[in-house]
Image: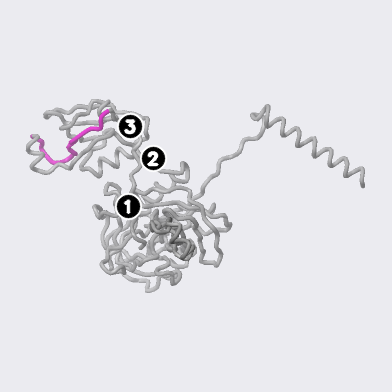
Amino acid sequence: MKKLWLIFAQTTTAGLALWFLLTLLKPAWLPKQVAEVVTLTQAPPAATAPAGGASTSYREAVRHAMPSVVNIYTSKQIKRKAHPLLNDPLFRRFFGDRIDNGEGQRTASLGSGVIVSAQGYIVTNNHVVASADEIQVALSDGRSAEATVVGTDPETDLAVIKIGLDKLPAATFGQVEKLNVGDVVLAIGNPFGVGQTVTMGIVSALGRSNLGINNPAFENFIQTDAAINPGNSGGALVDTAGNLVGINSAIYSQTSGSVGIGFAIPASMVKNVMEQIIKDGAVTRGWIGVDTQDLTPELAASFNLRNADGVLISGVVRGGPAEKGGVKPGDVLVGVNDQPVADFSGMLNLIAAQPPGQEARIKVLRNGKAIEFKVKIGKRPRFEIPQQEEE
């Protein structure tokens, strides 16, 4: 037996030594690591319940969607400025360390999130996890785990975090393009920390923008009257089949409570941002370095334009991609890669979708004549959104 053990030990030692030499001298001979493949549930969503009200219960939708919604608990250290008297030796002689020394205290907050992949990826709002020192995730089945931040996108108020549990129920992404005003939707989250809660409402409006919640250029909210309260942020907005159509993000309220005006980020935008964060850790958007303003009928008339489609370039960044490409202030930008530009939001989305480093064809009107320039797309600078209060 002792002889067999000696042979096993010698074989193991020789094998480890050989592996070390291969790693050091010939790493190409070793098998390559396979990059993680993130699986998203994107099967054709089930048909939603008939609009005529044939179904009086949404329990199947809730049963389908609720397991993928999680509660998120965060904490962070808040530092306060110490009083100058604390630096006085005489003062400290009498009072010692009994008075707050400015180190601050820990604050806790809560929110919600949606499991989007069985590999542990969870989508939530950026403002739920921003600056958090600790993130704890609680699942509907009673399990909990500490989460790490994969990446954030302040411009859309989205973030991706990850936990290390198995057998995770991932949400199914719905067809947002088929969503209409008047459709029934359900909001699932953890309002006020009371526990997982479902509320019902309808789609009140689509394409809400210029609300001052995120970067106005990327605001495209679903408005709903399903009750959304503090703690619901990052939770799911689902259709009547339980498919994810949005991530609850904000409310309009003068009382900090729900008044029937809530906003959710469409699942199509969520999926696009989420996939970039999972792949690269951040969202990279194209940029050409121009200041613009929407055309009004009066401005269009002053430029002898037949309509107000396009954006007026009021300034260009010195040394930026647009200036290098030949674009000048006073030009009217009307197209990007043969795609028409109607307004500022449309222009920004077309530019942001272009990969940095590649050339784009920028069509402008100058002195009534159409001119096309080739502009090398740059990387859009990170746009920080002031932190908002937890919804």
* Picture quadrant where residue 351 is located: top left
Q: Is residue 153 above or below residue 48?
A: above
User: Residue 269, which numbered label?
Assistant: none
Magenta range: 304-318
Q: Is residue 130 magenta?
A: no
Foreground pick, 128 / 364: 128
User: Is 252 situated above or below 305?
Assistant: below
Q: What residue is shown with label 2?
A: 284
Q: CA distance from mark 2 to mark 3?
A: 12 Å
Residue 107 in the image, given as x and y percentages of width and height = 44, 62
Q: Amino acid at mark 3?
A: Ile
x, y percent for residue 79: 42, 56
Q: Which part of the image, by quadrant, shows the C terminus?
A: bottom left
Amino acid residing under circle 2: Thr
Our reading of the magenta stretch's main secondary structure is loop
Q: Which mark is residue 377?
A: 3
Amino acid marked by disc 1: Pro
